[in-house]
Image: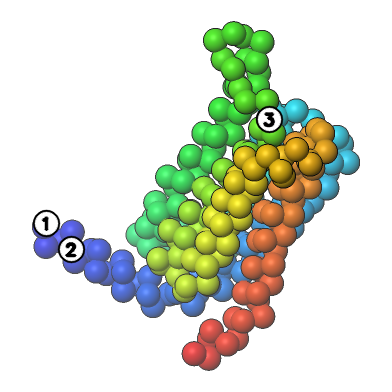
Amino acid sequence: MSPDWAKENLKVIRTLMERSTEYRRTLAPIMTYAGVVGLLAGSLAEWQRIRGPEKFALFWLCVGLVSIIGAFLLVRRQAIADKETLWSPPTRRVFQSAAPLLCVGVFLGMAEIFWSSAANNPLFKSDPNHPVTRLIALWLMCHGGAMHAMGFFMQRGIKLFGWVLILTGMTLYIALNVPLIVDRLPEPTPDRYGHLLMGALFGGAHLAYGIYLYFTENQADES
């Protein structure tokens, strides 16, 4: 371990600790924005009756891209206001912590598109039992894990938020494998409720957390 590498990491950690309140303030509009986008997207998809696992996955991957672009612009605006470099070492650390699980989420969505499109090919067989709802559960766990990883550079609230998403995803995934629950689900559950479920679990959860951050921001500044 070189002295320069250790010194740089200590500097980054110190900067992250000093700016935890600023990151929290930036996180509030990001979460609120993502929540509004999620709720609007769920309503739009249901209104337009976007059906099928491959269309579902493609639509929500696009929604995720819109959310990421909006979050980037919000972070850029904050960096300009603070007269700082956007792609600073602390920002890189936060991004690198969340990137692996976010990449897994993208992979799962692309895999769903591929498997559903190749359903007629005997070499590729996808699970016909509630594939969309299972994808939602996996996405929740991946996104929650990414939020929890980012929480190591911020205050503990985002870690708790990450755990909420992870546990919700676990609960949903388990419920899909309990016969007493699955047998009572109306058909076709993925097409009828998938978009609304995504809007509620992703959009609603992010919006609620964003509102919480706004209302507790003054308390964090005072402490």
Q: Foreground residue, 189 or 210?
A: 189
Q: CA distance from mark 3 to mark 1?
A: 51 Å
CB-based contact (under 8 Å), mark 1 and mark 2: yes
The residue that label 1 is drawn on is: 1
- The part of the image, by quadrant, that contains residue 208 is bottom right
Work out whether mark 1 precedes mark 2 in sequence or the reverse, and give the earlier one: 1
Q: Residue pushed farthest bottom?
A: 222
Q: Foreground residue, 218 or 134?
A: 134
Q: Which mark is residue 6?
A: 2
**Circle 3 crowding by C-alpha within 10 Å: few under 14, some 14–19, many from 20:** some
Q: Residue pushed farthest left?
A: 2
Q: Amino acid at mark 2?
A: Ala
Q: How is the image coloured?
A: rainbow
Q: Quadrant of the N terminus?
A: bottom left
Q: Is residue 8 visible?
A: yes
Please identify, in this view, whether the residue under mark 3 or under mark 2 is nearer the observer: 3
Q: Which mark is residue 175?
A: none
Q: Residue drawn 80% across and 33% down?
A: 188
Q: CA distance from mark 3 to mark 2?
A: 51 Å
The residue that label 3 is drawn on is: 129
| 198 lies above or below 183 | below
Q: Is residue 194 left or right of residue 140?
A: right
| 33 lies above or below 46 | below
Q: Amino acid at mark 3?
A: Asn
Q: Residue drawn 11% across and 57% down?
A: 2
